[in-house]
Image (spheres, grey):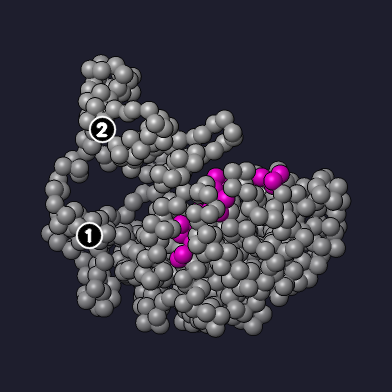
Amino acid sequence: YERALEEGINLRKTDSQQLGISLDEETTKEDIVTLWRVFAGDKKLPSLDELDSHFMDLSNDSGIPKNLRRTSDILTHSVFHQYHSETAMLRYLRYLQDKDIALDRAMIPLGSCTMKLNATSEMIPISWSEFANIHPFAPPQQTEGYRDLIGELENALIQITGFDAVSMQPNSGAQGEYAGLLTIRSYHKSRGEEQRNVCLIPSSAHGTNPASATLACMKIIIVKCDQDGNIDLENLRILAEKHADNLAALMITYPSTHGVFEDSLIQICDIIHENGGQVYMDGANLNALMGIAQPGKLGPDVLHINLHKTFCIPHGGGGPGMGPIGLNEHLAKFAPNHSVVPIEGLPLENTAVSAAPWGSPGILPISLVFIQLMGGSGLKKSSQVAILSANYLAQRLKEHYPIVYTGKNGLIAHECIIDVRPLKEVSGITEEDIAKRLIDYGFHAPTMSWPVPGTLMIEPTESEPKAEIDRFCEAMISIRKETQRVESGVWDKIDNPLKNSPHPSEDLTDTEWSHSYSQEAAVYPLASLRRNKYWPPVARVDNVHGDRNLVCSCPPLENYEEVE
């Protein structure tokens, strides 16, 4: 083990008798020779050339075993054989990029997703080997700077949220929920109240809330919401008192999933605490609170933080994600620990929720740089502008679409829900039609039919300039005028630009155009689109049919048949 360290190699030391070795595609022949030298000590080793001839000779049974040798062709898809220069590859990537609507092209109005700027200056450090190439089990004396960064971000999140401690281990928001609920269960168990397993969840909750509670072996009971989308306090009180002996937790989102600041948060927390439970706060909407309020001071006992939303880690691509949890003092000692790399101050019996002790720390520089660039006043202004932008958008659209939920002051938080159901009743136009039509205007769809069926949820974030929000509003207002043409009979209820959207570039050159509306109405509904037009790569897709009838767009199926 010590000889390996001298050679710059970390071996996994499981006990006094065993060492672990892990090799990957980046391991070189020179690395193998060094490793052999570590184990051989003073014994003579074959040269690199001898090793090559011995192990790469496929006729030699002591080389790669026959049952592990590949017999099929590799990289057979045509795309691997079309691009033979960096220039060609660059253009192919650009071709793929042009098919997408991303933040580099337009606002992404997805509600409850917080699609804010991922600044280049924040992203650069994650490519540095000092962060990207550190093994999560590397010895602590080799990772002091890495741990300092994690500690600095923990302290920043503590200051922002007002909690007493932060665990960086959960790898996603949903895993943060799970970890938070496990700390609550462990807390009750430590007090001799292991029977507390009832989790109250509002009917407006994110779908991950009941899923996480189920994984934590809790019994889920739904709390009603009133007509304004807020938690029904009377129903909450009845349920909390009814299950007082077994009440473990309430899961609540603040601001609410309906995009409103509920004015009864402290009262809600008091009801739960009076009946022996703990309050778990879903931090999905923390972008509306930075610098304005500290959730840890408002009553919740634990909160998860979506770094990919509020703190600028990019969405998409399947990960990696991060969902740290903030904990008040009485829960902090129950945070997840790790058996391989124990976290200082936590009991070893605390089980891990992730494979690595600090989740996916290679991406943490993004959030830390964001916080450092913004500073306290900048974070506060960020949330204020996010709320201002959402309310500006709602005020512009409310004359054209009903706003489903507002607070008592007639305002919203950081996102709004517009109602499309009245349009469907008179014109047959659905939320999906509007979402598809927005593609013709150069916008990604908002969140559809959630949390209320037949609606669209929109969240502009603080990153969008007023000009882009205005462009989105003009698109939505133009679409409303299009629905009125359907209502009045100017356009057919089946053959109209909304039902047939989106319209790819082929529609502009179609010499056999058979629709009742013009090609110009299809592809250039606003004059401004002539200057900068996004062309969708495909026309309308039947979502249900596609989900039920998977068709591979790869090479023909016969290419996958096994050759005997």
Q: Residue 153 at what x, y percent from top left?
A: 55, 66
Q: Secondary structure at mark 2?
A: helix
Please determine whether, in this image, residue 498 is positioned above or below residue 172.
below
Q: Which residue is mark 1?
A: 94
User: Which of marks 1 and 2 precedes in the sequence?
Assistant: 2
Residue name at image x 38 percent, y 28 percent:
43
Q: Residue 163 at what x, y percent from top left?
A: 68, 68
Mark 1, Cα crowd under 10 Å, few <14 / some 14-19 / many 20+, is few
Q: Amino acid at mark 1?
A: Arg
165 and 172: which one is in front? 165
Q: Quadrant of the C terminus?
A: top left
Asked whether residue 217 is drawn in magenta, I would say: no
Q: Amino acid at mark 2?
A: Leu
Mark 2, Cα crowd under 10 Å, few <14 / some 14-19 / many 20+, is few
Q: Residue 91 at what x, y percent from top left?
A: 18, 58
Q: Which residue is mark 2?
A: 48
Q: Nearer the viewer, mark 2 or mark 1?
A: 2
Residue 270: which numbered mark, if any? none
